[in-house]
Image (cartoon, helix red, strand yellow):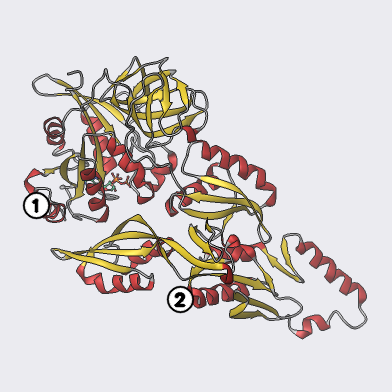
Amino acid sequence: SRTSHIRNFSIIAHVDHGKSTLADRILENLGAMGERDKRDQTLDTLELERERGITIKSTPIRLQYTRADGEKYTFNLIDTPGHVDFNYEVSRSLAACEGVLLLVDASQGVEAQTIVNAYLAIDSNLEIIPVVNKIDLPAADPEGAAQELEDVIGIPAEDAVFASGKTGVGVPNILEAIVERIPPPAGDPDAPLKALIFDSFYDAYQGVILFIRVLEGTLKPKDKIMMFSNGKSFDVDKVGTFSPALVVGDELIAGSVGWVAASIKDIHDAQVGDTITGKENPTTEPFPGFKPAQPVVFSGLYPTDTEDYRKLREALEKLKLNDAAFSFEPETSEALGFGFRCGFLGLLHAEIIQERLEREYDLDLIATAPAVVYRVTLTNGEVFETQNPAEFPTRDRIQLVEEPYIKLSIMLPEDYVGTVMQLLQERRGVMQTMNYIGKRVELLYEVPFAEILYDFHDRLKSISRGYASMDYEQIGYRDGDLRKVDIMVNNEVIDALAVIVHETKTYGLGRKIVDKMAEVIPRQMFPVPVQAVIGGKIIARATVKAYRKDVLAKCYGGDITRKKKLLEKQKKGRARMKQFGTVEVPQEAFLAVLSTE
Ligand code: GTP
C-alpha cells in the first residue's frame, strides 16, 4: 500500500533520560542536521523551553531512512512534552503514532515517568521498543535497567536496544528496530476524512496551524473541513509536512502526519484531541476521548506597577492566542489593585507563563497563592465550582465541599521510604500500594491535589537526596473539610491574602501568614493587630508594635515647623502604600507574604 514505508513514532522517557539528545542523534544519522544550524537541542523550539530543559510543544519531524538494501522509509518522529501538566498532550501525540521508543537511562533505571509514559503507550496499543540509553556512562548498568523494564512493566529484557545518544553507539540498531518492529499506519485513503489534531500554534499570517495525523481519507487544499466537537467549518488553504520547518505539499493521505492551515482565527476552534472531518462527507465516529483543555490551577496576577495593567492585558491576550489551555479574566483586589485571575494546567504551566510575561513582555508581577477548583454544595442544594477564595461562601451556607484528588506514583530507593511516607501523611495522602523492585520501591498514593501544589516536589527531592521521582494523574473529587482563612490587618480583611485550606492546617498556616505579615508591615503610631480569622473566629494573632514614645515626643513641644516637615515626608511615602483604615501597608509586604507561600 501507499503507507507501507511510513513509520510514525515518538520517544518517551522520564525527564533527563536523554530524549532530546537521542532525537538529535537520530536526526544527524539521517542527515537532517546538515543544511541547518546545528543547534544543541533541535527539537525544543521555543527559547524558554530550551532554557528550562523541558519540552513543551510537540514538534514533529519528517525524516528519510534508506536501509542497506536500498529501500527508502519515511519516519515521522513526533516529540512529546515531558511534564505531567501536559500529559493529555502526550497521549494525543501518541495517538498519532504506531510505536514508541521507551528510553531508560542505564545509570538510573526505571523512574516514575517511565512507568506512566509506558502505560500511556500500552493504552494506545503502541509497539514499544525499549531503549536503554546513556550506556557510555561509567555508572551504566544496561542489563539491570533492561531487567527493571521487564520486572516493572513486563517488557521482555531481551527486546531492549542498548544505545547512547551522546556517542551514537546503538543508534543504527534503533533505526532498524523502527522499521522491523513498528507497523506501518493502517487507514483507507478513500474513506471519509478523519484526522486527529495533536498540536497547534498561532501564526499571524496563516492563522492557526494544526498538526494532524490523518487516520482515514485524504486532505487537500480547497477541501471544506469541519471540527467534530463544535461543527465549525473552514476552507483548507495549505497542507504539508515537517522537515522540521513547515514544507508545503499537495495532499495528506491516511497514515501520514502533517500540518494544515485553514484561516482559523481562534485557537479555541482547533483544540488538541479534536477530530477533523470533511464537511460534505463526514465520518461518523470521531477519535475518542476529546476533552477541551481545562485549567486546574488558578492564581491572581497583578502588575506591581498599576500603570502596567494594559500592557499585562495585551501580553495575556497574545499568550492565549497560542495556548488554548490558558485562561484569564479581569479581577480586582483591594490590596493589589487591578489584575487578572488566570487558569493553568498545573504549576509548571503557571511558572512558564509568568516567566514569559516577565521576560518577553518586561512586566513585574505579583502572583497570589495558587488554588485548585473546589466544588461547593450550598445548604439550599445549589452546586458551584470556585477556585477563588474571595468567592468561597461562609460555613453556615455550605453543605459540602469537595476537592480534586490525584493518584501519585513515586519511585525511590528503599532507604527513604520512611521519610517519604511521613511527608505524604503530612499532605493527607492515603497509601494504595507499595511495590518492591529490587532495592527500590514504587509507592502509590491518593492525595488532595492542593497538597502537592506548593513545595511538594522540592521537599520530596530534598528528603530523598534527589533520588525520588514522581508523576500523577487527576482522579476526580472527594469530600474535604475545607475552610477559608481570612487575614485581617487593623481589623480589615485583606482580600489578596485569603486562602482555602484543610481544617487540620488552618492554625499552622494562619500563624505563618500573620507572623510574616507582622514582620513586614512598618511600625505605625499605634499598635496594629494582624489576625487570621475563620468565619469571625480569630485563630492566630500578631501585633505590629507602635513607634517608641520618644520618636513621637520630638514632635510635640513647640517646634511646629519640624512637625509639619515630618507630616510632609509621610505624605510622599504614602503614594506607594495601600491604605487599610488608618494603617498603610507597602506593596512589598504583600509580595513578601505571597512569595513565602
Ligand atoms: P527533557 O527534554 O527535559 O525531557 O530531557 P531529555 O530527556 O530530553 O534529556 P536531554 O537529552 O536533555 O539529556 C539530559 C542530560 O543527559 C543532558 O545533560 C545530556 O547531556 C545527558 N545525556 C543525554 N544522553 C546521554 C548519553 O547518551 N550519555 C551521557 N553520558 N549523557 C547523556
Q: Residue furthest front?
A: 380
Element under disc 1: helix
Image: 174 above or below 589: above
Q: Residue 64 versus residue 475: which sits nearer the camera?
A: 475
The quadrant where residue 380 appears = bottom right
Question: Is residue 33 something that shows in the picture?
Answer: no
Disc 2 residue type? Answer: Thr
Q: Residue 402 versus residue 238: which sits nearer the camera?
A: 402
Disc 1 residue type? Answer: Glu
Q: Residue 323 versus residue 303: which sits nearer the camera?
A: 323
Element under disc 2: helix
Q: Which mark is residue 143?
A: 1
Count of numbered circles on the image: 2
Crowdedness near tag 1: few (<14), some (14–19) or many (≥20) residues, C-alpha within 10 Å: some
At a point 32% along the width and 42% down the height, the residue shown is 90
Q: Are marks 2 and 1 in contact (CB under 8 Å)?
A: no
Q: Which residue is mark 2?
A: 504
Crowdedness near tag 2: few (<14), some (14–19) or many (≥20) residues, C-alpha within 10 Å: few
Horizontal arrangement in the rendering, residue 371 relative to residue 568 (left or right): left
